[in-house]
Each structure stands twice: as structure tokens, then as C-alpha cells.
């Protein structure tokens, strides 16, 4: 076992905050009632769920009725895309997205194409991972119902111009969903963003796994995925995960309250890491140089296999990743890196380092002490 551990895979999941655990504990043990039960324990559980909903709605500047608690980002995305397309058959059958979306979006789109006759346009991005508003506008047809474009990319950290895209969508009368699972430290005011639907995931916010929300603006037609007892306003049936919902709300609250201070701290650490990595010969940074998350660093190391590099760093207690954890079992380079125009062979040398609230300056110093020698050694073995 390594003598120390440096966790730089926060885009995959985060260590849960101690304050979040504290908030959840009563509902994991003593307050075990079902929110749907008409008794004292049930009503206490219901009050906890509704208080959490109020917290989330205040942070996003929306109505409480516009927040649906789910099991995470994947469910929320499926609900948004399938639910809106199914509820708007008469309006059209066209959906717009980008080639660098999370697999939860791309695989849902493929399903809708194959089984429900939806026509999907997958827009390209530039070499920095940005989709251009003019390209989105050109893709819109009279049959376009929905567009789904992520707020910030989970692999390269590039932040899209969501307000501009939202303004376009509104002017064309189409619905706009954004996957904001990586955007916990960004502005989440949906009025400013001009969006109709937004997905968030608790495990990316130092909250519990298996928790998330879908924000849906009032008036947006949407069919539910799950049918049953009619919980969550009939949008998402199933007994509510009370402890998880409480934990999600606490995690989102802590993240948003500290976002300016924490963003500045992470940018300093991120830029230190980037500067150190760029001193290694034949390394390219992926994503936008400035319009990027404060926590994300994606780099391609020429002449190095990312799997070998990941294993070697793991021996030193440095935990990074190839890219999306949801696609880690798939063979081949990341679809996001390929979309940037990186040749397939070169793309296989890409690694993602993602920072979080428990990342320290000492962690980055240690990584930059180890990384250059590891890369040099691997290149000498397989020149």
C-alpha cells in the first residue's frame, strides 16, 4: 500500500462532507418513517423532504414544485430527455445535443433514435470543446422539441455559454435541458441561465451517492418514467430516499455558499498543476484554457498509454482517471478527446485529474514530484 493517498478523481465521485453525514444520520436511524405515511414518524420524514426541497429551490431561484428528487444524474437525464420528447409528440420529433455529452445523454439519445423514432442532431465542438451558438441555430428545425447541452464537461472541464444558448432556445420556442452535474461551483440561477430543465448529482457535490434532482420549469410538458404511488408530484413514483434527499440539499447548500472562495482556491491549485504538467515534454492540455472548471485538468501525454500511466501513479497513491467513470469499462480512447480532433493513437495517452474540497497544495506538489519521472520511465520502456 502507498504511504499516502492523493485523490484526484473528484469528477467521478467526491468524499462526502462531514456536515452532510451529520445531517443525514437522524434519517438513517431514528427518523425512519415513510414520508407517505399519515402518522407522526411519516410526517416528520415528509417535513424533512419538503424542507430540503425548499433549500434547493432557494439556491436555484425556482419554485419548490419545480424540483424533483431522483436517484442521481442518469435518472434525471433520462427523465428529462425521454419525458419531454414523449410528451411533445404533436410538436415534433427532433432533439439537438453535442458529441461530447456524458454517456447518460448520448445513450438515451441513441435509445430514442432506435426505439421511438426521434431524430437526433449531434453537434460538433471546436478544439477547445465549445459548441458554437450559430451551429446550434442552424440545426434547429420546425420539428425541434428539445436541446440538451451540458453546462460543463466532465472530462475536460470546458464551460459552455449556457445563457446564450438558453436565449436562443427561448427565441425559437424549444425546450432547453442542461446537464449541470459538474457545475456545482458555478452559477445555478436558472433565470440567468435561461434554461427549462437542469440535472444535478449529489455525489459530485461532496454529497451522498444515489441522489440528484431534476429542475423542470412549470409548464414544460413531461411524462414520468416511473409509475406507482405518485410521489414527487406524480413525476417520480417510489418511496423517497429521505436521508439522501436531506444530504443532497445540505451538500448543494454548502457548495453554493462557499463557491466563490472555493473556486479561487481550486483555480490556484489547478493552475499550479497545469503549469507543472506543461513542463513535461510532449504534453498537451485539453479543453478551453480559461473557460474551464476550477477543478478539472485533462492532459494528453504523447508516447504514453493512459492505462499504464494510471496504474503507475496508483502505485504512488495518486488516484486519477481516464475520463468518465461511467464509460471506464469501454475499450478505446475517450469520445470527448476524439471530438476535439486529437488523433486516436495520441488520445490513448490522456489522463484526467479532478480536484475537490479536500485537495491541498501539498497534494499537488507531491503529484508534480512523481509524475515527470513516471512519464519518463514509461516512455523509455515503450519509446
Image (cartoon, rainbow, N blue to C red):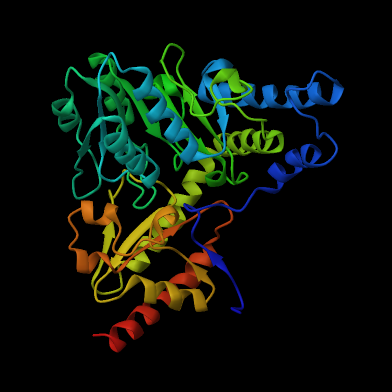
Q: Which residue is drawn at 53% across and 39% down?
A: 72
Residue 184 in view? no
Most extreme residue toward the bottom is: 381
The x and y percentages for residue 378 are 34, 83
Q: Residue at x 67, y 35 (%)?
A: 241
* Horizontal side, residue 18 vs residue 33: left or right: left
Of residues 269 and 305, the one nearer the viewer is: 305
The x and y percentages for residue 347 are 25, 64
Answer with the quarter of the image where residue 104 lies.
Answer: top left
Q: Residue at x 19, y 35 (%)?
A: 132
* Horizontal side, residue 144 vs residue 55: left or right: left
Asked if 51 appears above or below 300 in the picture, the reply is above
The x and y percentages for residue 94 are 24, 26
Of residues 14 and 307, the one nearer the viewer is: 307
The x and y percentages for residue 238 are 63, 30
Answer with the quarter of the image where residue 309 lies.
Answer: bottom left
Amino acid at each position: 500500500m502507498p504511504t499516502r493517498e492523493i485523490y484526484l478523481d473528484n469528477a467521478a465521485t467526491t468524499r462526502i462532507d462531514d456536515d452532510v453525514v451529520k445531517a443525514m444520520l437522524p434519517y438513517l436511524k431514528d427518523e425512519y418513517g415513510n414520508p407517505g405515511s399519515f402518522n407522526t414518524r411519516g410526517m416528520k420524514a415528509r417535513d424533512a423532504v419538503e424542507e430540503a426541497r425548499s433549500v434547493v429551490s432557494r439556491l436555484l431561484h425556482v419554485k419548490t414544485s419545480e424540483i424533483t428528487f431522483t436517484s442521481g444524474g442518469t435518472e434525471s437525464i433520462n427523465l428529462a430527455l425521454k419525458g419531454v420528447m414523449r410528451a411533445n409528440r404533436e410538436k415534433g420529433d427532433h432533439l439537438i445535443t453535442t458529441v461530447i455529452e456524458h454517456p447518460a445523454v448520448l445513450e438515451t439519445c441513441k435509445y430514442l433514435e432506435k426505439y421511438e423514432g426521434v431524430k437526433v442532431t449531434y453537434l460538433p465542438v471546436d478544439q477547445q470543446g465549445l459548441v458554437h451558438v450559430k451551429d446550434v441555430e442552424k440545426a434547429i428545425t420546425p420539428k425541434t422539441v428539445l436541446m440538451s447541452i451540458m453546462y460543463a464537461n466532465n472530462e475536460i472541464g470546458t464551460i459552455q455559454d449556457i445563457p446564450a444558448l438558453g436565449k436562443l432556445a427561448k427565441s425559437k420556442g424549444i425546450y432547453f435541458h442542461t446537464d449541470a452535474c459538474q457545475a456545482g461551483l458555478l452559477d445555478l440561477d436558472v433565470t440567468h441561465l435561461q434554461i427549462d430543465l437542469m440535472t444535478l448529482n449529489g455525489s459530485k457535490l461532496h454529497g451522498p451517492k444515489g441522489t440528484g434532482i431534476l429542475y423542470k420549469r412549470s409548464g414544460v410538458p413531461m411524462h414520468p418514467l416511473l409509475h406507482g404511488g405518485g410521489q414527487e408530484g406524480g413525476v417520480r413514483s417510489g418511496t423517497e430516499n429521505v436521508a439522501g434527499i436531506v444530504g443532497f440539499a445540505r451538500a448543494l447548500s454548502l457548495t453554493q455558499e462557499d463557491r466563490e472562495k472555493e473556486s479561487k482556491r481550486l483555480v490556484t491549485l489547478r493552475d499550479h498543476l497545469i503549469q507543472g504538467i506543461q513542463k513535461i515534454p510532449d504534453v498537451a492540455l485539453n479543453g478551453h484554457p480559461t473557460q474551464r472548471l476550477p477543478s478539472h485538468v485533462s492532459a494528453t501525454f504523447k508516447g504514453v498509454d493512459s492505462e499504464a500511466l494510471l496504474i503507475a501513479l496508483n502505485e504512488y497513491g495518486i488516484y486519477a482517471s481516464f475520463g468518465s467513470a461511467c464509460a471506464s469499462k469501454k475499450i478505446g480512447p475517450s469520445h470527448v478527446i476524439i471530438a476535439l480532433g486529437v488523433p486516436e493513437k495520441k488520445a490513448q495517452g490522456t489522463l484526467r485529474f479532478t480536484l475537490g474540497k479536500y485537495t491541498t497544495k501539498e497534494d499537488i506538489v507531491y503529484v508534480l514530484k512523481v509524475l515527470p519521472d513516471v512519464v519518463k520511465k514509461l516512455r523509455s520502456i515503450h519509446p
